[in-house]
């Protein structure tokens, strides 16, 4: 019971939290008083003024954060169907391409994003070869827009063009919808900037082969509760970003009984099932729009310091905070520290890229690392390193998920609702798991690992929030 | 028999956890059966088989708690047990592994719901944010940090008032809550007198003088040096008086402050009278006339305030200190670590008709142009904000004062030095360096220099009051327990009385 819940101060045992000089904690310990010693470090230089301004707004921000997080907790993302990007996403014509991360134009795009753009141009039939596609990309005739600004999310390059099939995920609690393309599997794939014939053929099969199967299956299955699916996957060793094996298996388990009943060619059905079964990350593209639908539920909460988007375009890492509306706050995208596929090394790595950080934004991925002992090699190799990673995220989060739980932490909810103030205040950066794309267009994935978001993005967002509240 | 069915929508716990939770709930007295289960078709069938009436629209993601007990109260107790265990499930750390320390007060409060107070001593520019977070987390605040703007102080105190919390500070040096010393506090005996202080060393002096007189302390609540200024309006002094009015241990209340804003003083007096307990306002440096409200006594020094409080508390054995001193005519220089002790000593010297220069002057025209350069009779408070920027408080780091001591002692115009030595929790454990400097200074100017030391401490302090007094006397100091007595001794030695 904290004091505000009815505990006074006189006549009840003192229990003290000490922030600052250890000597004072020592004198209390000497007197037999239980003391919780905060590991207090000064906030990043230059941010003390911002924090001091926000101090006066603490009550207002706390109330707003409660509201933002309440909405995220309430959000219930359901997979309701499949459609074509051009028909789903507002104002997405053949000459508009969506991409991951904050806004960026062709000249600033990194290798994998350029590669994916070329691939999408060819896929849409706007050019027949990469050279023509490149000229078109740089001609100014195309419009580029962030997925996040159109209700979508895209892994890695995240390029979406009009005729690509997309999952439709609805947050049935609040009615907002999010979209994401199908996962293409590993290796040479568009999202890692590959665009050759193999990539094109697969993209066409996703649209013409897989999409009808998924559409028909979902019609049979009815809306699929993704929140429940992800919650179960976490209990089975996924963290929802770099490990999706359990979730994909569970998804396939939902599909398996009804696939044979669908009135589609059995070869098509068999290929669809085999494709999903062979791709551990198939449901990353369901977890991501589930995350987007969840985070978007918390959009537009005035005065709240909760982060509702983190996304990278391969050049910049951007965040959005609900209390500052749709503004992006950016810093340079980091270099991923990770493990490389055979034959690749750090020199091959592109800077951090993709919207998949939406998983961390809602308490999955790096935030749920403790749920995924199978991939602890990313964080130091020991299960306790994974536990520490998750624990450190509670320090910067407003709440704990009511739905996503971690067995290794006695089913504690995952850290939910990044408070941009606390990132600045503690210097603890969000723990982000991610894949690594080759810096060269057309190569694909070269590894996976961890990346540190730029503190400056959080500092800028926090300063902007302080500005709005003054 | 009482049936109780509670549903938590969209709540998942693993089945083993639920089994254990159910088992604990079933063990509650008077409970016939208790089940916390996921609302799967199987579980629903089982519950229906036991004739529980259940809502229609349950799904497998919902959690159902079904309890059958002899009485409604027993059923409610079992439900509370279930809720408690489920909450516990979400809090536990993994076995055999230490949790990394919390990085913020909010995090600490979330980890430990029984925390009651945040002790904040971070650099001043960060203090307001920490304090705001602590209050929001429901913690009382002891803010040792200085350098918080008065606007921030007002906002924090208003917030604390809304939340029914204490915000002690900023620049709060001392508090004693139920016998626990916070910050710089002395191990005084417990008893009937409560102190509300806008000054850390003021509280220390008062509580130690009462301790010496055999009168104990119930609580001492620090409110920060500016609480009785017009802008702050005594918000925390008023809050503290309210708390102490209701505190059964407290029989007498002393309010310690620098001279307050008259309007605020009026409000405090009214609140003091409303406590229904005798209240003494000890206001060293008080020059203007402040009229006494009913039940409220005024004192112009800490010493007088302590004496009044001791009398009101029925204490006996108050002895005025008059130590013997030799004459060493010359200027008086005061070097203090405690601001209120400095003011107390200055008040005594000024009452003897002397002009007293200072960095915290009694009158504006007595302000030192430069606190590093003395003029005439001169008292310096080394704990003042200006002299603590970027360094520890002189009670922790006495080096600045020691350096000044040597300079003043060597000045042929100076006849008397007055210093405070403050013992207690958190204070420099052994002022041995001062003793060494003093021996040398007195040896250098035999018969020409007197050192008067006001030794603020309680018998049970960790540094041992007796041992410290002996050590200081052996080094040649005139040692008193009160700053006022030290100042009187200084006047006597300087030939001014």
Image: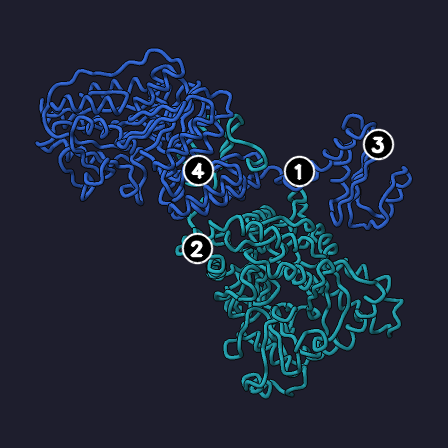
Chain colours: A cyan, B blue
Residue of label 2: A50
Query: Which comes before the other along the chain, label 1 or label 4?
Result: 1
Element class at badge 4: helix
Q: Where is residue A405 in the image (x, y as percent from the top left)?
A: 68, 48
Quadrant of residue B33 within the rendered picture: top right
Label 3, on which residue? B2
Tag in front: 3 or 1? 3
* Image coords of residue A70 (percent x, y): 65, 52
Circle 4 marks a residue in which chain? B
Q: Position of residue A6 (x, y in %)?
A: 58, 34
Q: Write the residue at 65% across / 45% down.
A: A412
Query: Circle 1: is it few (<14), some (14-19), or many (20+) Cα within 10 Å?
Result: few
Distance from the alpha carbon under mark 3 to that under mark 2: 56 Å
Q: Distance between the residues labelled 2 and 1?
A: 36 Å
Q: Please, what secondary structure does the residue beneath circle 3 have?
A: strand
Residue A92: % across, % down: 66, 78
Position of A11 with respect to B13 (left or right) is left
């Amino acid at each position: 019971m904290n004091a505000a819940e009815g505990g006074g101060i006189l006549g009840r045992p003192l229990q003290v939290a000490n922030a600052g000089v250890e000597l004072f904690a020592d004198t209390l310990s000497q007197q037999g008083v239980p003391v919780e010693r905060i590991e207090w470090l000064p906030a990043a230089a230059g941010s003390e003024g911002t924090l001091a301004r926000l101090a006066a707004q603490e009550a207002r921000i706390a109330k707003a954060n409660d509201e933002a997080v309440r909405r995220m907790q309430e959000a219930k993302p359901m997979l309701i169907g499949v459609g074509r990007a051009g028909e789903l996403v507002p104002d997405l014509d053949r000459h508009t391409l969506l991409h991951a991360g904050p806004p960026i134009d062709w000249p600033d795009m990194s290798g994998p994003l350029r590669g994916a753009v070329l691939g999408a141009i060819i896929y849409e039939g706007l050019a027949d070869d990469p050279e023509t596609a490149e000229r078109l990309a740089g001609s100014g005739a195309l419009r580029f827009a962030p997925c996040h600004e159109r209700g979508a999310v895209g892994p890695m390059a995240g390029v979406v063009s009009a005729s690509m099939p997309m999952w439709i995920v609805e947050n049935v609690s609040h009615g907002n919808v999010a979209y994401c393309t199908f996962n293409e599997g590993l290796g040479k794939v568009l999202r890692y900037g590959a665009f050759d014939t193999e990539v094109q053929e697969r993209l066409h099969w996703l649209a013409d082969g897989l999409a009808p199967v998924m559409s028909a299956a979902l019609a049979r299955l009815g809306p699929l509760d993704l929140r429940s699916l992800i919650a179960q996957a976490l209990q089975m060793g996924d963290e929802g970003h770099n490990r999706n094996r359990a979730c994909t298996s569970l998804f396939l388990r939902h599909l398996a009984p009804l696939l044979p009943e669908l009135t589609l060619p059995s070869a098509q059905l068999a290929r669809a099932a085999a494709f999903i079964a062979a791709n551990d990350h198939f449901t990353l593209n369901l977890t991501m729009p589930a995350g987007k639908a969840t985070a978007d539920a918390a959009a537009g909460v005035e005065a709240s310091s909760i982060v509702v988007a983190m996304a990278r375009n391969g050049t910049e890492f951007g965040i959005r905070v609900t209390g500052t509306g749709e503004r992006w706050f950016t810093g340079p995208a980091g270099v991923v520290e990770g493990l490389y596929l055979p034959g690749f090394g750090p020199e091959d790595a592109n800077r951090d890229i993709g919207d998949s950080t939406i998983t961390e934004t809602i308490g999955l991925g790096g935030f749920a690392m403790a749920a995924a002992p199978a991939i602890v090699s990313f964080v130091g190799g020991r299960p306790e390193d994974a536990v520490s990673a998750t624990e450190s995220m509670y320090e910067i989060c407003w709440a704990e998920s009511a739905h996503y739980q971690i067995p290794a932490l006695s089913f504690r909810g995952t850290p939910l609702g990044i408070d941009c103030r606390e990132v600045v205040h503690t210097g603890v950066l969000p723990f982000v798991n991610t894949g690594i794309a080759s810096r060269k267009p057309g190569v694909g994935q070269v590894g996976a690992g961890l990346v540190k978001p730029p503190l400056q993005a959080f500092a800028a967002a926090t300063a902007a929030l302080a500005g709005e509240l003054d | 028999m009482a049936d109780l069915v509670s549903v938590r929508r969209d709540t998942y716990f693993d089945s083993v956890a639920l089994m254990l939770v159910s088992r604990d709930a079933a063990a509650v007295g008077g409970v016939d059966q208790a089940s916390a289960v996921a609302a799967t078709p199987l579980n629903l069938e089982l519950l229906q088989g036991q004739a529980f009436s259940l809502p229609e629209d349950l799904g497998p993601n919902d959690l159902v708690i079904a309890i059958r007990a002899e009485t409604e109260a027993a059923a409610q107790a079992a439900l509370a047990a279930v809720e408690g265990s489920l909450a516990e499930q979400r809090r536990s750390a993994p076995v055999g592994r230490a949790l990394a320390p919390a990085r913020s007060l909010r995090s600490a409060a979330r980890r430990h719901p029984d925390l009651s107070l945040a002790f904040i001593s971070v650099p001043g520019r960060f203090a307001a944010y920490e304090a705001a977070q602590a209050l929001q987390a429901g913690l009382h605040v002891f803010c040792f940090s200085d350098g918080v703007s008065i606007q921030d102080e007002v906002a924090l105190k208003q917030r604390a008032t809304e939340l029914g919390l204490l915000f002690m500070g900023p620049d709060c040096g001392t508090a004693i809550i139920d016998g626990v010393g916070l910050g710089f506090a002395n191990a005084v005996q417990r008893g009937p007198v409560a102190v509300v202080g806008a000054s850390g060393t003021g509280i220390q002096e008062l509580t130690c003088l009462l301790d010496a007189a055999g009168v104990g302390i119930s609580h001492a609540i620090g409110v920060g040096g500016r609480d009785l200024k017009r802008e702050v309006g005594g918000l925390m002094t008023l809050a503290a008086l309210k708390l102490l009015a209701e505190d059964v241990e407290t029989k007498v209340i002393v309010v310690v402050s620098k001279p307050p804003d008259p309007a605020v003083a009026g409000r405090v007096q009214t609140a003091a009278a409303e406590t229904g307990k005798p209240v003494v306002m000890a206001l060293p440096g008080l020059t203007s006339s402040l009229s006494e409200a009913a039940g409220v006594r005024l004192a112009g020094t800490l010493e007088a305030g302590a004496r009044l409080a001791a009398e009101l508390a029925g204490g006996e054995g108050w002895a005025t200190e008059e130590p013997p001193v030799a004459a060493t005519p010359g200027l008086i220089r005061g070097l203090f670590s405690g601001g209120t002790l400095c003011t107390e000593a200055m008040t005594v010297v000024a009452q003897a008709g002397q002009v007293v220069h200072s960095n915290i002057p009694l009158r504006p025209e007595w302000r030192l142009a430069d606190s590093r350069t003395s003029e005439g009779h001169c008292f310096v408070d080394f704990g003042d904000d200006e002299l603590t920027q970027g360094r520890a408080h002189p009670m922790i780091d006495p080096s600045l004062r020691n350096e000044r001591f040597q300079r003043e002692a060597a000045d042929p115009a100076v006849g008397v030095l007055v210093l405070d030595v403050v013992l207690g929790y958190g204070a420099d454990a052994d002022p041995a360096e001062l003793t060494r400097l003093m021996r040398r200074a007195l040896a250098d100017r035999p018969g020409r220099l007197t050192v008067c030391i006001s030794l603020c401490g309680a018998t049970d302090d960790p540094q041992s009051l007796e041992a410290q007094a002996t050590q200081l006397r052996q080094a040649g100091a005139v040692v008193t327990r009160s700053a006022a007595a030290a100042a009187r001794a200084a006047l006597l030695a300087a030939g001014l009385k």
